Amino acid sequence: MNHFSQFFTFLVIVLATSYIDAFTRNDFPEDFLFGAATSAYQWEGAVDEDGRTPSVWDTFSHSYDRGNGDIACDGYHKYKEDVKLMADMGLEAFRFSISWSRLIPNGRGPINPKSLLFYKNLIKELRGHGIEPHVTLYHYDLPQSLEDEYGGWINRKIIDDFTAFADVCFREFGDDVKLWTTINEATIFAIASYGEGVAPPGHCSPNKFINCSTGNSSTEPYLAAHNMLLAHASASKLYKLKYKIKQRGSIGLSIFAFGLSPYTNSKDDEIATERAKAFLFGWILKPLVFGDYPNEMKRTLGSRLPVFSEEESEQVKGSSDFVGIIHYTTFYVTNRASASIFPIMNQGFFKDMGVYMISTGNSSLFEWEATPWGLEGVLEHLKQSYNNPPIYILENGTPMKHDSMLQDTPRVEYIQGYIGAVLNAIKNGSDTRGYFVWSMIDVYELLSGYTTSFGMYYVNFSDPGRKRSPKLSASWYSGFLNGTIDVVSQDSTQLQSNFSASSSL
Ligand code: NOJ
């Protein structure tokens, strides 16, 4: 099929399957932010340049045979080029993270002046192009020195070190950064990094699937998440006391949020779904909004679930100005015996949650089925159960084989479906304020290295220059943001001709 007929087929599919009404950028509030995201280790490269020291992610990726972030997209050197791509695309916001071990090479102590310059330049470049920076402080990349010294997030010492790191960021960058996320996808970070061993630093109990050098899957995820909540609350308190009046920014914590829906309409499956929501959302959101863990978790976990002192509970409660949502896919939930969606462990979070999660469609490592109604359900649940907090969708997108065509039609279809779901949720009263595509460009992927990617720009990772080429999704997003695309009656000829001009790998 040639480009045009491919695109035309796609358009027909979208028209035929779309369950949303037509919409444009203008249907969203003016101050709603549309952006795209990356993270430091996945985008920057330059891992041993200008004073940066290794993080647990460097160590983790070098212990597996699935590539590493040594060079990644070389964003450290190519940031100006990337900001230009963002500006050309009409991006309103860019979410990136700060490499702690670049900024403070030993995790604690002296600041690295070259890294200060890098992040200040990046922020200046963004602002110069009218792009709002959304900064994540922690995205899987603890300085290795702190992991070696005391075990990182499973030790309460992390609270002080994280707060000191946050203090440097607020002080140095806060005049130009109004949106801060303290920790990326706290829930899945605790589960994948401390229970299943599939993300850095790779802790888990001994098992036959993954060779973790240390860990306890029954306790560490809960301990790590507890310390994340306390570290977030401490950084947030500091921001409010020392910076907020002058800098006028907001600070939030983010969770990974699967769409969850009962498999059948049986009472059992409904109860199982409520339990899954308590474990997957309430674990972090109940403390943030109400000051304590969900009863379902307390009952199941007993002494394995840490306890907040009265003072801690007060500090955690209300510590997030917004909730960050990382959303990709939806599962049906049933009350059958539990199993992990990661390699099956006979202990840990998924066992404790005690439900069985069934994929809603033909999702695979290479493509995820778009189920926008799942995100709408998450936003409705948060509105109803957590006092309608301000929300930013900090990540949403779909992976495809890295070397697949630049015509990433399934991604366009996926993204526009989810943007439609966000609009529906807003119309139903959700206080959602922003949406970020993961990812702005192809990056080193957390679970799949360079085999799959989510980017709207293709990056040729075999080219030393790391050439970027726009995919169809970049043209689509650009047209949507510039108001030239109405999701149902978009100007296909225009989009296709814009795209064809640069569509070879
Ligand atoms: C989760 C993480 O925040 C990010 O690092 C990862 O690459 C994407 N989502 C895709 O899995």
Image: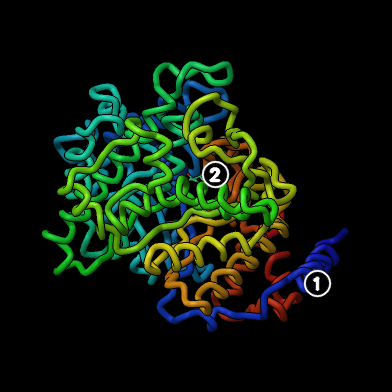
- Describe the element under mark 1 as helix, strand or loop: helix
Q: Amino acid at mark 1?
A: Ala
Give the residue at mark 2: 466
Q: Pointer 1 and pointer 2: residues touching (CB < 8 Å)?
A: no
Q: Which numbered disc flags the more N-terminal residue, 1 or 2?
A: 1
Q: Is residue 269 left or right of residue 78?
A: right
Q: Mark 1, mark 2: which one is toward the viewer? A: 1
Give the residue at mark 1: 16
For label 1, count other residues whose C-alpha is less than 10 Å away and answer few (under 14), some (14-19) or many (20+): few
Residue at image x 43%, y 32%? 193
Residue 378, horizontal then vertical, whole percent: 52, 60
Residue at image x 44%, y 26%? 217
Alpha carbons under labels 1 and 2: distance apart = 38 Å
- Describe the element under mark 2 as helix, strand or loop: loop
Q: Is residue 474 left or right of residue 41?
A: right
Choose top left, top right, bottom left or bottom right for residue 464.
top right
Q: Amino acid at mark 2?
A: Arg
